[in-house]
Image (cartoon, rainbow, N blue to C red):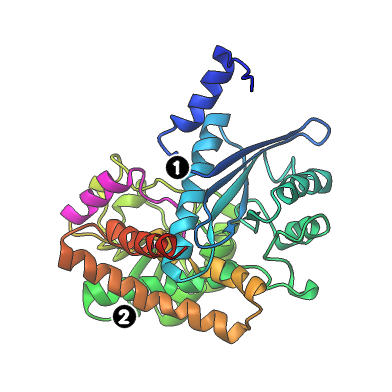
Amino acid sequence: MTTTPIDSKTQSAAFSVFGNTAFDNHEQVVFCQDKDTGLKAIIGVHNTVLGPALGGTRMWSYANESEALTDVLRLSRGMTYKSAITGLNLGGGKAVIIGDAKTQKTPELMMKFAEFVHRLGGTYITAEDVGMETADMDLVRTVTPYVTGISEEKGGAGNPSPITAYGVFMGMKAAAQHAFGSALLEDRTVLVQGIGHVGESLVEHLSNEGAKVLISDINQERLQAVRDKYHATIYAGDNLYEAPVDIYAPCALGATINDETIGHFKAKIIAGAANNQLADEKHHGAMLKERGIVYAPDFVINAGGIINVYAELEHYGRADVIRKTENIFDTTLEILQMSDREDITSHQAAFNVAQQRIDARKRSN
């Protein structure tokens, strides 16, 4: 057997993956490129012990390829623990497409991406995420069966955003029960940062329960539309982290809980839909605990979306989807109680529960 020497350039590229701080024993990282369509994508398969790696595809204008790699590594890892703690027989995976979804996403690009997904033979199953729509998943389905979240007209579970929002709402109510002694959010002040599909649905749930809802987003047009539709208030302060609210709900991109923001929080609870809200899970989780801020771990409470798309694989109905999503309330409450009982961060408590399930499956195989 002969081996091919690895030159310094190739070696550096390899180390940029294995040496990345977000790399966590990922099983597979696939780089996808197509000159004709302009596709540049990365698929991360973190763990398949519990089942195939399911996770959405995100299209975003990353500052550079290193940023895209870090994102897909963190997101795919989060999907592993999200599925594990929710009791789903799925592993964790994610994909990112580098580019502006509004100007660079084309049917040809999506179909070429679908070809790369298909080559993995079901190890990775894709779905909708930031920059994607249900129609995109319908298009991917014309190329590969390894996709969920297709439209209801085509036999799928449809847009997962409303169910994701409902799960976040359940997790938020559990956090309120833990922090305030009541799950009722009526008259509680909640700041929703990011009012995309999930954020808007969350605003609807909160408004229906009588919460005082503040909203923040970079899209002023959407802000005004959501304000008018749900009688919410646009946050006008200079620093949204200093907003005098009961609950902060990050529903945009991750890492808004970091060294610069934690000292400003007035909120007693952080519970939102964004993935990877803690810039550093251990460090910032500990900082929140020290400040007495109740943190509902993102991968616990935003699991409604994966529950929704998992229904396509297991062929269960809407009533089962709702029931499983409502279980997020109990799971979140148990995690927060464990955090207090064992004097560990809520993120660590959730991670421990998820890892125990993965380890148990390993031992049984």
Residue 278 x/y as whole percent? 35, 49
At a point 55% along the width and 72% down the height, the residue shown is: 163
Residue 342 percent location from the top left of the image: 17, 64
Residue at image mark 1: 25
For label 1, the SS is loop
**Magenta residues (range):** 270-290
Which quadrant of the figure has residue 162? bottom right
Residue furthest to the front: 1
> Magenta stretch containing residue 287, yes or no?
yes
Asked which quadrant contains residue 359, the reply is: bottom left
In this orientation, does residue 188 appear?
no
Q: Nearer the viewer, residue 195 or 181?
A: 181
Q: Position of residue 216 (x, y in %)?
A: 46, 55
| C-alpha span from label 2 to label 1 | 38 Å
Amino acid type, label 2: Ala
**Residue pictured at 47% horizontal, 32% vertical:** 18
Look at mark 2 in the image and give the residue it sits on.
183
Left or right: where 233 falls relative to 145: left
Quadrant (top left, top right, bottom left, bottom right) of the N terminus: top right
Figure check: 179 above or below 27:
below
In the image, which is nearer the foreground, mark 2 or mark 1?
1
Q: Nearer the viewer, residue 287 or 149?
A: 149
Q: Secondary structure at mark 2?
A: loop
Indicate the position of residue 292 as horizontal and vertical percent values: 18, 59
Residue drawn at x 23%, y 68% as measured from the top left: 338
